[in-house]
Amino acid sequence: MSTTSPRESEPLPPTPPEAWEPLLRLTRIAGRPLERFLRIEAASGILLLVAAAVALLWANSPWADAYVHLWHTPVGIRLGSFEFERSLEWFVNDGLMVIFFFVVGMEIRREVHHGELSEWRRAALPAAAALGGMLAPALLYLLVAGAPATRAGWSVPMATDIAFAVGVLTLLGKRVPAALRVLLLALAVIDDLGAIVVIAAFYSSGISMAGVLVAALGFGGVFLMQRLAVRAKLAYVAPSLVAWAGIYAAGVHPTIAGVIVGLVTPVRAWLGPDGFMTGVRHELEHLARVNPSALSSHEFAERLRRVDVARREAMSPAESLIETLHPWVAFGIMPIFALANAGVSLSGGALDADAWRVISGVAVGLLIGKPVGILAASWLTLRLRIGVLPTGLTLRHLVVLGVVAGIGFTMALFLAQLAFAAPELLAAAKIGVLAASAATGVLGLALGRVLLRPARTEGAAESADEAESSTVA
């Protein structure tokens, strides 16, 4: 016979006391399709595709001038004699994208600490594949578009767009084993790291020591607060903004500030799951022994605060921030970036020779350079027994991986903005990225359906793939 009182067995109240039930029920009904969409693994890629299509259609519609005027709208702040004003496009590319790079920095730190890049044998293959997938497209671009006026775009075809790439693999369904997704994610992390190095080394103007000192002050504030055990995440916003301003004033691209702060964000939890369970159990047991009517509001608030601390410290700051910021980046910042940068006019008249060089160089780099570089580097790494191929993967999987990695959207458009100041060449680079990424996505989907077999029972799959896996190694 249960000893639970009727009050204890009652479920949680379904709504807050001040909620209006009919309106709340209506919003839940309206929100269900959105919730289902956001649970789809490829949802971010779909939203990116929609944003890019809207930008492209808008830039080639009768309202094209409105598109240009929108992103060139001046936005700024004024405090006394201080005035800071930039275009809306600048705030997207150099402001919002800092958060994107902050998350990238934390993901790199996490993978190096306890992820796929934490052991050199597991990291060797994605590292080599990423390196080959960056060098080959850059070299092919220079081979096709190495003229003095166009050679600055060599970095544009180097980057992989993980949202679109994962989206293509998701569309292949059971044909794609989990190990292939993990390998793609590890490759993309190293790929992003390479793009960050390129931005810092090649797309920064003359270094200003005054800006470097300001940035050092901001980063010093972050380190000092960590040593003082400051755990409130919002407290780190102020020194991070100082670091961002210093990096920008120094002549380095400000997104690098986001990367550095991400890389120094702690990846070890204070309490962890066990500490969380122990702390919460202790507080609940204490509350269970006390008469609720005799418990003061101050003591109850203190107990709740301790539970909240245990909840907050169950995960590392990096893991917690990634979980919090990832939806905002995937479903907010990246689509806004696509909307601001994918709009290129296709009716601007005949393209000159330099524009065609840029388009051809970017397209060849993404369509051919990416898969060739990834496959060649992977084969060499496995042949020399430096790295190991994850269980269940074969040469066919690496072919699909190489092709899908040629989808270079977000980071490629970002690098194009840095590489070309001339509007004509920037537009050509965008055309090359959009066309090549679309073609690569379709090709990757087609090859996946032809080369990869749907998942079967484990024993049958191992016997069918054993011979092919040995030829790769």
Image (cartoon, rainbow, N blue to C red):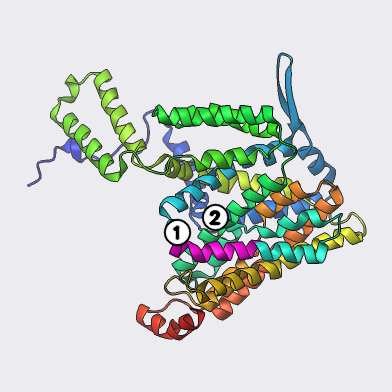
> In the figure, residue 300 lies in which quadrant?
top left
Say above or below: 130 vs 90: below
Say above or below: 317 vs 393: above
What is the residue that sits farthest to the left in this orientation? 1
- The percent coordinates of residue 455 (x first, y second) are 44, 76
Q: Main secondary structure of the magenta part?
A: helix
User: Could you say which is closer to the camera, residue 254 or residue 16?
Assistant: 254
- The percent coordinates of residue 30 (x first, y second) are 51, 46
> In the figure, residue 231 lies in which quadrant?
top left
Residue shown at 45% from the left, 42% from the top: 318
Label tally: 2
Tell me the crowding category of disc 1: few under 14, some 14 to 19, or many 20 or more residues within 10 angstroms, Cα based: many
Q: What stretch is highlighted in magenta?
A: 120-134
User: Could you say which is closer to the camera, residue 6 or residue 270?
Assistant: 270
- The percent coordinates of residue 154 (x first, y second) are 75, 57
Q: Read off the residue under disc 2.
A: 189
Q: Read off the residue under disc 1.
A: 116
- In this rendering, position of residue 13 left or right of residue 108: left
Say above or below: 334 vs 116: above
> In the figure, residue 347 lies in which quadrant?
bottom right
Q: Can residue 234 be seen in this view?
A: no
Does the segment drawn in magenta span residue 171?
A: no
Q: Earlier in the sequence, mark 2 or mark 1?
A: 1
Say above or below: 63 vs 309: below
Look at the numbered disc 2 and give the secondary structure of its residue.
helix
- In this rendering, position of residue 195 left or right of residue 395: right
Residue type for callout 2: Val
Residue type for callout 1: Glu
Q: Are marks 2 and 1 in contact (CB under 8 Å)?
A: yes
- The percent coordinates of residue 292 (x first, y second) are 19, 25
